[in-house]
Image (spheres, grey):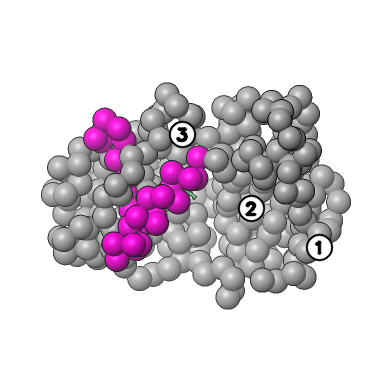
Amino acid sequence: MNNDLQVWLNGEMISRRDATVPILSHGFSRGSAIFDVLGVHSGPNGPMAFRLDDHLRRFNNTAALVEMELAYSTDKIVEAVKATVKANNIDRGLIKILAFWSEEAITELVLNSKLDVAVFAIPEGEELVLDKKHSITACVARWRKLHPETVPVGAKACANYLNGYLARKDAVSRGFDIGVLLGTDGFLAEGSTESVFVVKNGVLMTPPLGRVLSSITRLSILQAAPEYGMSIVERSITGNELMAADEIFVVHTGTKIEAVARFEDRELAAPGPVTSQVMQMMDDIMQFKDERFKKWFMPMD
Ligand SMILES: Cc1ncc(COP(=O)(O)O)c(C=O)c1O
């Protein structure tokens, strides 16, 4: 663990070692914490954040969905992200923004205060491996995705991740890399920390919002794929369709795109032809080769 990292906490730059909360804090003991994660890419003239505005829109939306209020405006958080990238001399890595109730809470379930905000900038390296290019194995997790009427599944709330943890644990204990969650209605939802895409007869499909997190990588693929001549639809996908897919891949800000080489007991082309096309498209965008999508990046100076 790199303890030399500088962390922005409520307007102050402090060392990572000091970026802690009390064990009895509401955020830790009751899980009242939300977060967002975005990528910083090495641009021709310095580090560039990918879709920072969309990530902060999702972060604000998460706060609204869990009925909590951030102590800082979006402009202030943009400033904090830039300051943290600079303080840590980040060229390529991930930004993790967290907001939480830091007050100790013995019995209180609801607090009236605004959420503290912390910004971490973690460079690519031993602690953080980005763009894993290998293929993975996946299964259907024995746990179902949280039902959207029990908690807002579109919120990137730390407490929601118990569901993802259990799915990943189940998959790993059965020898798979990841578990894919179906909803309680049997339709495909998403992975523990990744969105799922399925290819059938050359058409790309992914489940609609309402049952999954509004992944920014998912959104980028939905927006860019038609520009690259690919057919793509958002629609409900049954467990049977998942089992009969020609190709399956999962996406996440850090790992980008991972092709599934075995799903349950079925071997799949990994990457198959459509997955390869999507990978190439995302590489072009992320390496600033596609003029149409340069608008998705914000300089960090
Ligand atoms: C549940 C879940 N779905 C999807 C994703 C992918 O989202 P993004 O593309 O914004 O990283 C994540 C990311 O961590 C996630 O936690």
Q: Is any part of residue 179 visible from this angle?
A: yes
Lower position in the chain sequence, tag 3 or tag 2 = 2
Q: Amino acid at mark 1?
A: Ser
In-image side of 102 versus 195 (left or right): right
> Mark 3 and mark 2: span between their CA atoms?
19 Å
Instruction: Quickly name the residue at label 2.
Output: 96
Q: Do the residues under discs 2 and 1 have CB atoms within 8 angstroms?
A: no
Residue at 67 percent of width and 45 percent of height: 28
Instruction: Quickly name the residue at label 1.
Output: 15
Q: Is mark 1 within 8 Å of ligand 1?
A: no
Q: Position of residue 134 (x, y in %)?
A: 35, 71
Q: Is residue 26 above or below residue 142?
A: above
The label on residue 267 is: none
Residue at 50 percent of width and 59 percent of height: 254
Foreground label between 2 and 1: 1
Q: Is any part of residue 118 visible from this angle?
A: no
> Mark 2 and mark 1: span between their CA atoms?
15 Å
Foreground label between 3 and 2: 3
The quarter of the image holding the C terminus is bottom right
Q: Is residue 48 magenta?
A: no
Q: Which residues are magenta?
A: 160-187
Lower position in the chain sequence, tag 2 or tag 1 = 1
Q: Nearer the viewer, residue 244 or 218?
A: 244
> Mark 3 and mark 1: span between their CA atoms?
33 Å
Residue at 24 percent of width and 65 percent of height: 261
Q: Position of residue 218 (x, y in %)?
A: 41, 45
Q: Position of residue 297 (x, y in %)?
A: 59, 51
In-image side of 138 versus 123 (left or right): left
Residue ranking furthest to the right: 12
Instruction: Quickly name the residue at label 3.
Output: 153
Dot 2: element: strand
